[in-house]
Image (cartoon, helix red, strand yellow):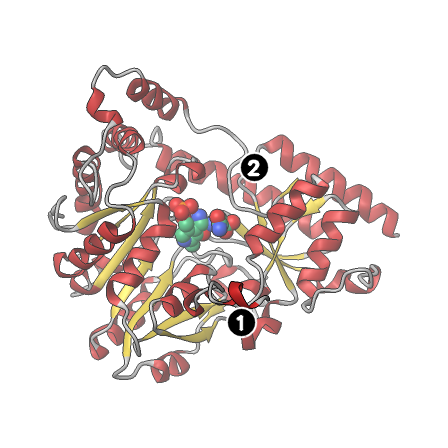
Amino acid sequence: MCEFKKKFSLPSRYEFEGKSVWVEYHELATKYNPINLGHGFPNFPPPQYVKDALMEVASSPDNSLNQYTRGPGHPRLVQALSKLYSSFIGREINPYTEIVVSMGGYQALFLSIMGIIDKGDEVIIMEPYFDCYADNVKSAGGTPRFISFKLKENINGVTSDDWVLDRGELEELFNPKTKAIIINSPQNPLGKVFTLDELTHIADLCKKWNVVCISDEVYEWLVYDSRKHTRMATLPDMWQRTLTIGSAGKSFGVTGWKLGWVYGPDYLIKNLQRVVVTCIRAGNTFLQETAAICIEKELSRLGQKESYFVSLGKELEAKRNVMFKFLTEAGFKPILSGGGYFMLADWSSLENLIDLSEEKDKYKDHRFTKWMTKNVGVQAIPINPFYSKDHKHLGENFVRFCFVKTDSYLEQTAQVFKTWKLQLQ
Ligand code: PMP
Ligand code: GLN
């Protein structure tokens, strides 16, 4: 780089390894136009009442909806969120001091980490993890400490429940420098839904070491079969040390809205509200009003089959089953997902049947997913980017598929895999 430009190189707090998998695979999808089961988003529209709410706000004569709103969250939205979560948490959540609204679950994570992590603090992260966790911790000056899920043998066939942590290993990571642990349930990319027993073990460690739990629950409504979503903040004495993250994008099938929130105790939320002032001051009024209307609608039918929070989960469970079947028939070993948008599949038994020599990436899952995009016309996401630098090899046998797609899109994928499988024989 020439001398005068050197002064302006990327600040070291943003120097992370490699290219973002989202940027890379978005470019790949644009170039090859595959069936896109990579990036996690629904390819079907949100329910009609969500579109109606958008129209209602767009045509409202109330000009204040086009102007700046309250910084830490639009009053109607924080009131709706308070009503929604107070009923689940079993305590009255103060809409003004215990909630902060953000630009997506993504910024909710940013606010939570920037709001509590300082130089020298350690943060425990479970691998594979949603990739911005570690980058945020590093940019806050903290140190991520990683622990990997291991896949248990299960003679009845593995499911995402079989990804477990070694409890002794987790206990050893806690020390006086530990400030936070990040959990994600339902989990991206594994589809794991944490059991009450697993959460209790983590909660006990948080209490023992005076650690905050950042609980990423953006897929909170999407749990399958007989599983239940347990909110970390409901465990005994955990409210005062838990920041819980939610997303309108995931709740209403509108990922492009990028509207999220954090709720938790006032002494922590106060810090996050301070971070909001430094980076955005106030979010988008129009979408916050719309999301408030949608939540109010859901509040009137919580837990009933008409609720989108209930019906979307049912719909996605059926889609997950369709995907499990066609991936198995194509020669993958999928791991039945318990929640969220994604299913992991072991592709290693296909390795000897194909030639990946044209692909030059370091990790096999990267080579395979690129090859599959170009040669089969189906895109999935490699798993190594969800691991820290020294553990990337642990993800090489797996790829991630998103099943939040129309039935016809999934049927089309099944046909493409069928044709490809026939060519292989
Ligand atoms: N957390 C997890 C686990 C995710 O998968 C995502 C991706 N959407 C986010 C947070 C970010 O949510 P949003 O799209 O609302 O920014
Ligand atoms: N959560 C989505 C996924 O994992 C979106 C990721 C993103 O926008 N970076 O595919």
Query: In the depicted view, which residue is nearer to us: 181 or 177?
Result: 177
Query: For the residues marked 2 and 1, what is the alpha-carbon distance in whole angstroms?
Result: 29 Å
User: Which quarter of the figure has residue 284?
Assistant: top left
Identify the disc placed on residue 152. 1
Is 117 situated above or below 62? below
User: What residue would you read off at disc 2?
Assistant: 405
Q: Position of residue 94 (x, y in %)?
A: 11, 47
From where the camera sits, is residue 330 visible? no
The numbered mark, 2 or 1, whose residue comes first in the sequence reads: 1
Q: Which element carries disc 1, helix, strand or loop?
A: loop
Residue depth check, mark 2 versus mark 1: number of the one nearer the observer: 2
Identify the disc placed on residue 191. none
Q: Which element carries disc 2, helix, strand or loop?
A: loop
Q: Tell me which residue sits at (48%, 71%) in the image.
A: 149
**Within 8 Å of ligand 2, the CB of disc 2?**
no
Position of 394 compared to 277: left or right? right
Q: Position of residue 246 (x, y in %)?
A: 32, 48
Q: Tell me which residue sits at (81%, 48%) in the image.
A: 421
Position of 388 compared to 278: left or right? right
Is 176 situated above or below 424? below
Q: Tell me which residue sits at (44%, 39%) in the image.
A: 255
- Classed neighbour count for the residue bearing mark 1: other residues with Cα under 10 Å, few (<14), some (14–19), many (≥20): some
Dot 1 amino acid type: Lys
Q: Position of residue 141 (x, y in %)?
A: 34, 72
Q: Tell me which residue sits at (35%, 28%) in the image.
A: 306
Is 402 situated above or below 285? below
**Which quadrant holds the N terminus?**
bottom right
Dot 2 amino acid type: Lys
Q: Position of residue 31 (x, y in %)?
A: 70, 42
Is 255 situated above or below 382? above
How many numbered circles does the render carry? 2
From where the camera sits, is residue 190 visible? yes
